[in-house]
Image: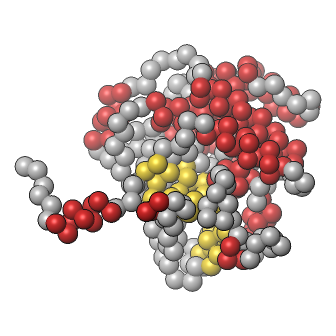
């Protein structure tokens, strides 16, 4: 029997913000462009340009994905019926559907003439499917110590391209909130950062950005996404002559309750900002917060913690 909504409920439903936003089809091109802009006069310019080059290959993989077995639509539908992430990273990384994306990335990527980069690519080419699988499982589960640091950006780039392609190419997804505020409803991965939107009737709402598939889901503001408390939250940013502290395009929401933080990108202060590039461009803020004893729980799959 269908549910009948009263007039007040109808108005509330009509004004409710969308729970989910899918990434744009040119996601990786946007990231590459932004990284190139951020690299100008940046102390980590070479690294940002390296990642920009990887993002361009990711866009190629999204536009022209490698041939592979189709995903199990019956399993995807079953997951949705039970409110589970249909592209659960902890299970799909143990299968091999993503490995053609790594092979294609290794084939299409033209590396800079840096011995460390070339050596990392050769290591991935020579690795067995089982070894690659073990590294991927460790990476998406946050066990960075089990993955050689030099391999992380290339392995992470392939995984991101695969999951974003699956997300964008699967119609009529019905996704529900994860077990925690910081968990992606699509793949179960943790959020990388948050974005405060700046347009339309949902201006000012916060959406978290998945570290793997890049989908965005709505989470109310002024609440720690890890322990869900609101008391004592602070918003910290790097000193910048161009912006007042309360107008910085990127600020860390710091929670004294669980001693963690999450970066937030404010589009009203920089409409062209993008989560992954903004995160990589603000690693000095992570260093400052680490010195103050705060822990980062949000992964960036293109950067090994403590690695430049």
Q: Left or right: 60 with respect to 93? A: right
User: Is residue 8 or residue 43 the one in the foreground?
Assistant: 8
Residue 116 visible from this viewpoint: yes
Q: Position of residue 246 (x, y in %)?
A: 67, 77
Colour scheme of the rendered structure:
secondary structure
Residue furthest front as drawn: 200
Which residue is drawn at the image coordinates 51% and 40% (left, top)?
A: 89
| Residue farthest bottom in this picture | 232
Q: Is 35 rendered above or below residue 10? A: above
Answer yes or no: is residue 138 visible: no
Which residue is painted at 92% across and 33% down in the image?
114
The image shows residue 307 at horizontal and vertical percentages of 81, 50
Q: Is residue 82 left or right of residue 26?
A: left
Which residue sits at x=39%, y=55%?
A: 18
Report which quarter residue 179 is drawn in: bottom left
Residue at 55 percent across and 16 percent down: it is: 67
The residue furthest left is: 1
Decide if residue 106 is on the left or right side of residue 59. Answer: right
Q: How many marks?
A: 0
x then y, percent, for residue 124:
74, 27
Q: Quadrant of residue 236?
A: bottom right
Q: Position of residue 129 (x, y in %)?
A: 63, 23
């Amino acid at each position: 029997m269908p549910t009948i909504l009263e007039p007040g409920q109808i108005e509330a439903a009509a004004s409710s913000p969308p729970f989910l936003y899918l990434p744009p089809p040119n996601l990786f091109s946007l990231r590459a462009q932004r990284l190139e802009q951020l690299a100008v006069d940046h102390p980590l310019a070479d690294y940002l340009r390296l990642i920009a080059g990887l993002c361009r290959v990711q866009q190629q993989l999204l536009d022209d994905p490698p041939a592979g077995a189709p995903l199990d639509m019956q399993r995807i539908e079953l997951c949705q019926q039970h409110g589970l992430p249909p592209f659960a990273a902890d299970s799909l990384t143990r299968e091999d559907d993503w490995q053609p994306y790594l092979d294609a990335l290794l084939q299409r990527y033209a590396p800079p003439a840096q011995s460390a980069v070339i050596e990392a690519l050769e290591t991935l080419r020579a690795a067995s499917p089982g070894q690659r699988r073990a590294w991927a499982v460790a990476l998406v589960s946050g066990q960075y110590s089990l993955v050689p640091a030099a391999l992380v950006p290339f392995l992470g780039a392939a995984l991101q391209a695969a999951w974003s392609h699956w997300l964008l190419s699967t119609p009529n997804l019905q996704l529900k909130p994860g077990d925690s505020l910081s968990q992606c409803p699509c793949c179960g991965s943790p959020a990388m950062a948050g974005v405060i939107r700046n347009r339309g009737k949902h201006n000012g709402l916060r959406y978290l950005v998945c570290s793997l598939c890049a989908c965005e889901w709505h989470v109310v503001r002024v609440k720690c996404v890890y322990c869900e408390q609101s008391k004592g939250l602070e918003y910290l940013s790097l000193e910048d002559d161009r912006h007042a502290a309360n107008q910085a395009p990127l600020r860390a929401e710091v929670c004294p309750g669980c001693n963690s933080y999450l970066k937030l990108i404010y589009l009203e202060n920089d409409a062209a900002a993008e989560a992954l590039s903004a995160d990589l461009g603000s690693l000095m803020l992570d260093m400052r917060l680490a010195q103050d004893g705060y822990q980062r729980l949000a992964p960036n799959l293109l950067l090994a913690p403590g690695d430049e």
